[in-house]
């Protein structure tokens, strides 16, 4: 799965002339912005056919909204070292 995602990322972000400025990226910051833009699109605007043509973030939000709080763990989860 990681190889498939990597290939998709290369095709849709790195090699895509729409994402890449003319002459290529000029700095690491330009690449970071392109990657962040791609990840945002991939999660929030891309319509995914396997989940009813909705964006993955919307699908996940609907999933968790349909599960009442009683299904969550009742035990406190440690969030940092040394907490109880």
Image (cartoon, rainbow, N blue to C red):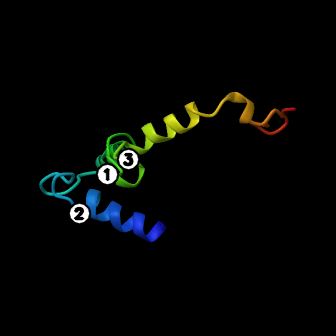
Whole-Å distance between the Cαs marked 2 and 1? 12 Å
Indicate left or right for 79 with 54 as reference. Answer: right
Q: Residues within 10 Å of mark 3 (few under 14, many from 20)?
A: few
What residue sits 57% from the left and 33% below the top? 66
Tell me which residue sits at (36%, 50%) in the image: 48
Tell which tag, 3 or 1, sits nearer the viewer: 3
Q: Residue at x 87, y 32 (%)?
A: 84
> Which class describes the residues within 10 Å of circle 2: few (<14), some (14-19), or many (20+)?
few
The quarter holding residue 33 reads top left
| Image coords of residue 19 (percent x, y) | 21, 51
Task: Give the percent coordinates (x, y) of residue 4.
Answer: 41, 68
Which numbered marker is on residue 2? Answer: none
Q: Secondary structure at mark 1?
A: helix
Q: Say which residue label 2 marks.
A: 15
Q: Residue at x 19, y 57 (%)?
A: 24
Mark 2: secondary structure: loop
32 versus 7 height, above or below: above
For the residues labelled 2 and 1, say whether their Cβ atoms are less than 8 Å apart: no
Q: Are marks 2 and 3 in contact (CB under 8 Å)?
A: no
Chain-order first, disc 2 or disc 3: 2
Going from the N terminus, do you reach mark 3 or mark 1 first? 1
Q: Considering only vertical position in the picture, is 36 above or below 79?
A: below
Instruction: Find residue 12 and report its horizontal and vertical position in percent.
Output: 27, 58
Q: Nearer the viewer, residue 83 or 54?
A: 54
Residue 52, numbered label: 3
Q: Nearer the viewer, mark 2 or mark 1?
A: 2
Q: First in sequence: mark 2 or mark 1?
A: 2
Picture disc at residue 31: 1
Q: Nearer the viewer, residue 13 or 62?
A: 62
Query: In the drawing, does residue 30 fall left or right of residue 68?
Result: left
Question: How far is disc 3 from disc 1 in space, using C-alphas?
Answer: 31 Å
Q: In the structure shown, which secondary structural element does the residue marked by tag 3 occupy? A: loop
């Amino acid at each position: 799965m990681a190889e498939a995602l990597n290939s998709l990322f290369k095709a849709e972000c790195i090699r895509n002339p729409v994402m890449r400025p003319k002459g290529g990226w000029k700095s690491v910051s330009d690449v970071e912005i392109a990657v962040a833009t791609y990840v945002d699109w991939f999660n929030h605007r891309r319509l995914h056919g396997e989940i009813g043509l909705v964006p993955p973030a919307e699908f996940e939000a609907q999933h968790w909204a349909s599960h009442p709080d009683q299904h969550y763990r009742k035990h406190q989860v440690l969030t940092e070292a040394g907490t109880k």
